[in-house]
Image (cartoon, grey):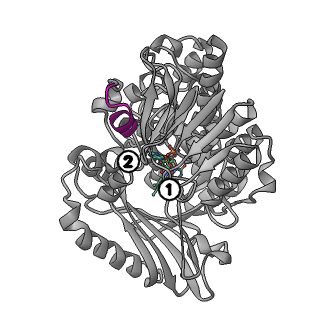
Amino acid sequence: MRAIVIGAGLGGLSAAAHLRGAGHDVTVIERGALPGGRAGVIERDGFRLDNGPTVLTMPGLLADAFAAAGASMDDFITIKPVDPMYRAVYADGSTLLVRHGREAMANEIERFANRHEADAFLRFCDWLERLYTAELDAFIDANFNSPLDLVKPWRAGLELVRLGGFGRLGRKVASFFDDERLQRIFSFQSMYAGLAPYEALALYAVITYMDSVEGVFVPEGGMHKMASGLADAVEKAGAEIRYNTDVAAIHRASGGRVTGVGLADGTSVEADVVVCNPDLPVAYRELLPDVRPPRAARNGKYSPSCLLWVAGVRGLPPADAAHHNIHFGNDWDASFAALIDDGVRMPDPSILVTLHSLDDRSLAPDGCSSLYVLEPTPNLSGTIDWSRERERITGELRARTAALGYPTDVVVEEIYDPADWERMGMEAGTPFGLAHTFFQTGPFRPNNVNRKVPGLVFTGSSTLPGVGVPMVLISGKLAAERVADYAARR
Ligand SMILES: Cc1cc2nc3c(=O)[nH]c(=O)nc-3n(C[C@H](O)[C@H](O)[C@H](O)COP(=O)(O)OP(=O)(O)OC[C@H]3O[C@@H](n4cnc5c(N)ncnc54)[C@H](O)[C@@H]3O)c2cc1C
């Protein structure tokens, strides 16, 4: 079949890889000049600065996408573990290094806290592993046609009940660890799903499994290499990628079936199937204005957003800095309540400082560093007027970064606030999509197909299974499965 993939984000590229591997004739149409979408890069004045994801987990899923295109990931990119995965710095000045490998991490926890907590960590890992095993095939790597599909894999469902997956994440993690600092480092990952640990279901601890147990990795040459490498593999497999080309409409026949796309320059491209990678609510609004979007895309709850400051700076980081540095504020529940419930800035912000050039000197000129500073903020449904507050909030973030000892003598820089994310096509001004509340997950998340538009399939973070690099890579595979079903029915 002739397949068009709108968008060369990681979701679109994964779909293209799987579709090409299945023998379809694939054209990817991307509005930007580069592949990767949110996993972008700025190359300027000798710096190579990632401006999207910094934490790569589950690299096997990336390897699967290359393999689907008949390629070996190792021929395109080299992935290396990041160890320590995180340096967590707490408000009381204590520091925990999150290490690769259970033994190394248990030893670190014994140093940081005591043997009792180290043993708890080993039990926690066993629990996480069982949780992940129960969830992956039955609930994450799965297409859903109705909520009833949730109960079909009943054995996995029962196992989740047994494991306490439907309790609250914060409480579950606290049942393993007495030390509040450890509770924080093993539950903050719920933020990746747009939820506070006290509201997220314990089953979202799979995200903690993905980083704290399976490990954090980075491609040589920076995170964007995931996308440029996969794009190369997809093209080598025979797909065409057209950059700087904006899709303006998805065309349909009178019965609703897709027939191709209309481009912004007024021309059309015909196709039997269209896989759509732009943020799903935006895609419905802009490309399918006469189709009613699913419930969650009409009035869904969106994840918090972030203010991102990416800079190439003169100078080197302090000796104790790690690749990923989380500086926790003092407040915990109050910070999440501010962000998620009240829509205001965290009173005492926790921030992530990533130093890609620490492990990869090719990313910055001699004597210089790459700096990536991220502060979670409310999305645009919050109360901050970014046109007025941007300067002040960015100034505070710069001052905090400098006070923490990082070099901040800027050579090149870019700043992205929620209004920028919205301009870049992300609903509600958040790059983290629809939050993973229970009723926006699995069969309740906007589906990757719409019965009224046969031949249209969605991929990416606001459809199944969800947000983040591992999930959107799976979403591309699930999209290709939908295309196979459609082809079989025609
Ligand atoms: C600052 C930041 C930090 C993050 N941190 C992490 C992290 O550490 N770990 C992690 O796993 N995830 C992280 N994420 C999330 C992760 O990057 C995303 O979930 C994922 O990359 C989204 O991929 P996607 O394919 O769904 O969408 P996108 O990457 O947005 O791809 C959509 C593509 O469609 C194109 N497009 C849109 N409209 C059109 C059109 N009309 N015509 C043609 N093309 C179009 C866009 O240009 C884009 O290339 C982060 C994201 C950001 C921005």
Of the pair 397 and 163, the residue shown nearer to us: 397
- Of the two numbered discs 2 and 1 on the same chain, state the one appearing first in sequence: 1
Q: Which range is magenta?
A: 282-290
Residue 471: percent from the left, percent from the top?
56, 39
Mark 2 burial class by Cα count in 10 Å: few <14, some 14-19, many 20+: many
- Label 1 sits on residue: 32
Looking at the picture, does residue 315 appear above or below residue 202? below
Q: Is residue 299 one of those drawn in magenta? A: no
Q: Is mark 2 within 8 Å of ligand 1?
A: yes
- Element carrying mark 2: loop
Residue 280: percent from the left, percent from the top?
41, 36
Residue 218 located left or right of residue 269: right
Residue 362 located left or right of residue 465: right
Looking at the picture, does residue 379 appear above or below residue 280? below
State whether residue 22 appears in this view: yes
The C terminus - image quarter: top right
Q: Which mark is residue 426?
A: 2
The N terminus - image quarter: top right
Residue 267: percent from the left, percent from the top?
47, 42
Question: Residue flagged by tag 1: what amino acid is it?
Answer: Gly
State whether residue 118 appears in this view: no
Q: Which mark is residue 19?
A: none
Looking at the picture, does residue 242 appear above or below residue 286? below
Q: Main secondary structure of the magenta part?
A: helix
Q: Is mark 1 within 8 Å of ligand 1?
A: yes
Of badges 2 and 1, nearer the viewer stands 1
- Element carrying mark 1: loop
